[in-house]
Amino acid sequence: MKAVVYHGSADIRLEDVPEPKLTEATDAIVRLTSSAVCGTDLHMVRGTMPGMREGTILGHEGVGIVEEVGPYVRNLRPGDRVIIPSTIACGSCSYCRAGYQAQCDNANPRGSRAGSAFFGGPEDTGPFDGLQAEFARVPCANAGLVPVPDSVSDDQAIMLSDIYPTGWFGAKLAEVTPGDTVAVFGAGPVGQFAVLSAFQQGAGRVIAVDGIASRLAGARALHAETVDFNEEDPVEIILEMTRGIGVDRAIDAVGVDAQHPSSGPAVPGDEAAEEFAAERDAATAGGARPAGDTWVPGDAPSQVTRWSAEAVAKAGSIGIVGLYPPTLNAYPIGTALNRNLTIKLGICHHRRYIPELLAMVEAGTVDPATIITQHEPVSSALDAYQAFDRRETGWTKVVLDPAA
Ligand SMILES: NC(=O)c1ccc[n+]([C@@H]2O[C@H](COP(=O)([O-])OP(=O)(O)OC[C@H]3O[C@@H](n4cnc5c(N)ncnc54)[C@H](O)[C@@H]3O)[C@@H](O)[C@H]2O)c1
Ligand SMILES: [Zn+2]
Ligand SMILES: [Zn+2]
């Protein structure tokens, strides 16, 4: 079968690989009908999410048809159409039962204190082969896979595999309550779902910050007020837009590949630029191999943590879903402490949120497919990865057809 395979920083290949087989009693084999490329994949290929094992199939967003099930998958049959949650969780341990599926005790073969188990990730996450492929082995399928009603399209369902739940989780972490003014840093696909989710959770105003015009236009289409960090200082303008108070909540939907402004009033001074460069070296552990303007690690890993800690009101709260690697230790803890901020962060508990979001999609309350900007055959996956990596105009969310 065809699959997108990781070989090293800046080195991914479309290859023919063997089809997966059932290995555990709770496994299912799923034939993917839709997959997608995510900002998380970019971190791994840029080298800012280190520890990838050569030969791992990439991708953690998938929708498909169940082909085969192990003997302990008693709730699904071949032919069922399902969403595959990005994180893998057993459904039995105390963490899963409490809704903390990303911290499942059993899904990660490296042990209960290893990282969240997810598809197509670094060594510490399993590793498990991912979903940018024609078929996938889905562990803990009985507790993970979510059946999709016929009225929900593949394009809608694929947004529920990872990024809509993650945007929703970001708003939950930030403790959005009715009437709040919320800043969302990053207007990529996850940021756009954070904008949508913040409004759905009652926000009165949402301010989206990014440096890419087409992505800011996407956030504006969702009725966010937008700020281009290459034109304005986001902290200054957020204070001005909120009568000097700041926002109640902030959501970080950027993560380690954050960039500092390249123009405008918020370009960092020499000292900050040096700090950022040291952070980037720590994050990549020397493993990045940028090629021209492609696969370039972010030049300011802690930029968004700094801006969000300054842009929230005193005693405000911040939800971080942008990913940061364990090798990075930079956080503006002094600012946060002295302003009595609440910070919550983590990997999304996808399986916890998918059913309620799916119900809203089925009811027609929201159409998550509007975030998709490209449909590409998996045979064009490498070009699609690069255009998305370079944040080319209009390339915000790429859905892959695994069979084409
Ligand atoms: N926690 C989770 O479970 C989870 C799940 C999915 C994705 N993620 C993470 O969410 C983040 C966003 O994912 P995505 O697919 O939208 O990625 P993306 O790379 O498409 O989007 C990131 C956006 O941030 C913008 N940006 C860069 N520097 C910025 C800055 N200083 N201020 C504001 N915006 C800035 C970029 O221009 C880009 O539009 C990634 O870190 C991804 O790994 C986390
Ligand atoms: Zn993703
Ligand atoms: Zn569990």
Image: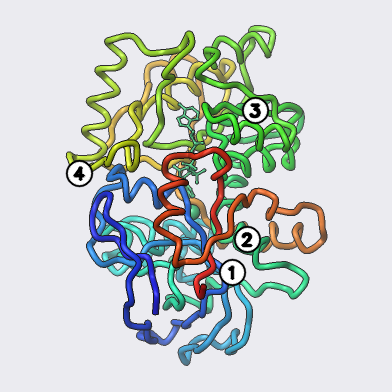
Circle 3 residue: 182
Mark 3 to mark 1 CA distance (whole Å): 30 Å
Element under disc 1: strand
Q: What residue type is labelled 1?
A: Ile
Mark 4 to mark 3 CA distance (whole Å): 35 Å
Q: Please identify, in this view, whether the residue under mark 2 or under mark 1 is nearer the observer.
A: 1
Q: Which amino acid does label 2 sit on?
A: Ile
The furthest residue to the bottom? 71
Q: In this view, does 313 lie to the left or right of 285?
A: right
Q: Are marks 2 and 1 in contact (CB under 8 Å)?
A: yes
**Residue drawn at the location 62% of the way across and 35% of the way down:** 175
**Residue drawn at the location 54% of the way across and 59% of the way down:** 98
Mark 2 to mark 4 CA distance (whole Å): 35 Å
The quadrant where residue 227 appears:
top right
Mark 2 or mark 1: whose residue is earlier in sequence: 1
Circle 2 residue: 354
Circle 1 residue: 83
Mark 1 or mark 4: whose residue is earlier in sequence: 1
**Between residues 299 and 88, which one lies in front from this camera angle?**
299
| Label 4 packing within 10 angstroms: few (<14), some (14-19), many (20+) | some
Mark 3 or mark 1: whose residue is earlier in sequence: 1
Mark 3 to mark 2 CA distance (whole Å): 23 Å
Q: Do the residues labelled 3 and 1 touch (CB within 8 Å)?
A: no
Circle 4 residue: 287
The quadrant where residue 255 appears:
top left
Q: Where is residue 35 in the image (x, y as percent from the top left)?
A: 52, 65
